[in-house]
Image (cartoon, rainbow, N blue to C red):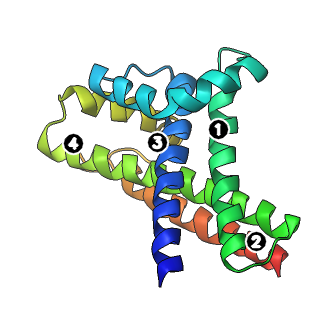
């Protein structure tokens, strides 16, 4: 029982930090301008790891690659802890668990952003955070919107993107797990 509680704590910590590192990178990729409170939160959550990593991994192409490396390190920590719990250290298992964690963080992160955008579209589409979330979702939704126009004034791209992310998650998870066994 103590192991399951410890695993829950480690999973929560690595997921929150890994998600924050990935969000920091996504903000740079889409050139979004987060509201000041969100920017401060992300900065305070991630700067402790990004600052030393930047010395070894310089930014290139206008992107802070240290954020991606930090997210990968969080996934590795999570995988190492999982293998430690079952007392089975194998490089192949650690690599696959790391890839699986990163995949889940990215997909569930986008799913969360899609849900937030859907809520804002109904509640307050002009909120400062709403425009920020729309900017983060744009790379995912714009290709879908090119193929599927709004129907009767309703934009179904968020719903379609949500289902596509679920399909991608299941397919890639099965591929990763099938190569693990």
Q: Viewed as shown, does residue 149 lie left or right of 147?
A: left
Q: Is residue 141 visible to the viewer in this orientation of the structure?
A: yes
> CB atoms at circles 4 and 1 under 8 Å apart?
no
SS at circle 1 = helix
Residue toward you, 90 or 155: 90
Residue at coordinates 67% horizontally, 28% vertically from top-left?
66
Neighbor class of circle 1 (other Cα within 10 Å; few <14, some 14-19, many 20+) is many
Residue positioned most to the bottom: 1
Q: Please report the residue visible at 33 percent of the width from the left and 29 percent of the height from the top.
A: 38
Q: Which sits earlier in the primary sequence, circle 3 or circle 4?
A: 4
Q: Quadrant of residue 129?
A: top left
Badge 3: few (under 14), some or many (20 or more) residues near its Cα, within 10 Å? many
The total of numbered circles placed on residues is 4
Quadrant position of residue 130? top left
Judging by the rendered image, the residue that carries numbered circle 3 is 141
Camera-nearest label, 4 or 1:
1
Dot placed on the residue nearer the N-terminal end, 3 or 2? 3
Q: Nearer the viewer, mark 2 or mark 4?
A: 2
The residue under label 2 is 175
Measure the C-alpha gap from mark 2 to mark 1: 25 Å
Structural distance between the alpha carbons of marks 4 and 1: 33 Å
Q: Earlier in the sequence, mark 2 or mark 4?
A: 4
Q: Quadrant of the C terminus?
A: bottom right
Circle 1 residue = 70
Judged from the image, the secondary structure of the residue bearing numbered disc 4 is helix
Residue 23 locus on image (x, y percent): 49, 36
Number of other residues with Cα within 10 Å of mark 2, as a class: few under 14, some 14 to 19, many 20 or more: few
Query: Which residue is label 4 attached to?
Result: 121
Whichever of callouts 4 and 1 sits on the residue coming sooner in the sequence is 1
The residue at the far left in this view is 123
**Marked residue nearer the N-terminal end (3 or 1):** 1
């Amino acid at each position: 029982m103590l192991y399951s509680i410890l695993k829950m704590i480690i999973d929560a910590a690595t997921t929150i930090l890994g998600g924050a590192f990935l969000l920091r990178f996504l903000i740079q990729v889409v050139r979004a301008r987060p509201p000041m409170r969100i920017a401060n939160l992300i900065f305070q959550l991630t700067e402790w790891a990004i600052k030393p990593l930047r010395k070894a991994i310089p930014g290139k192409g206008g992107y802070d690659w240290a954020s991606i490396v930090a997210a990968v390190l969080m996934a590795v920590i999570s995988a190492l802890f999982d293998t430690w719990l079952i007392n089975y250290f194998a490089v192949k298992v650690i690599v696959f668990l790391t890839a699986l964690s990163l995949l889940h963080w990215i997909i569930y992160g986008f799913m969360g952003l899609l849900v937030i955008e859907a809520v804002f579209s109904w509640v307050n589409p002009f909120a400062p955070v709403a425009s920020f979330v729309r900017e983060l979702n744009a790379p995912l939704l714009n290709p879908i919107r090119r193929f599927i126009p709004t129907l009767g004034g309703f934009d179904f791209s968020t719903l379609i993107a949500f289902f596509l992310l679920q399909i991608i998650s299941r397919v890639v998870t099965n591929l990763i797990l099938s190569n693990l066994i």
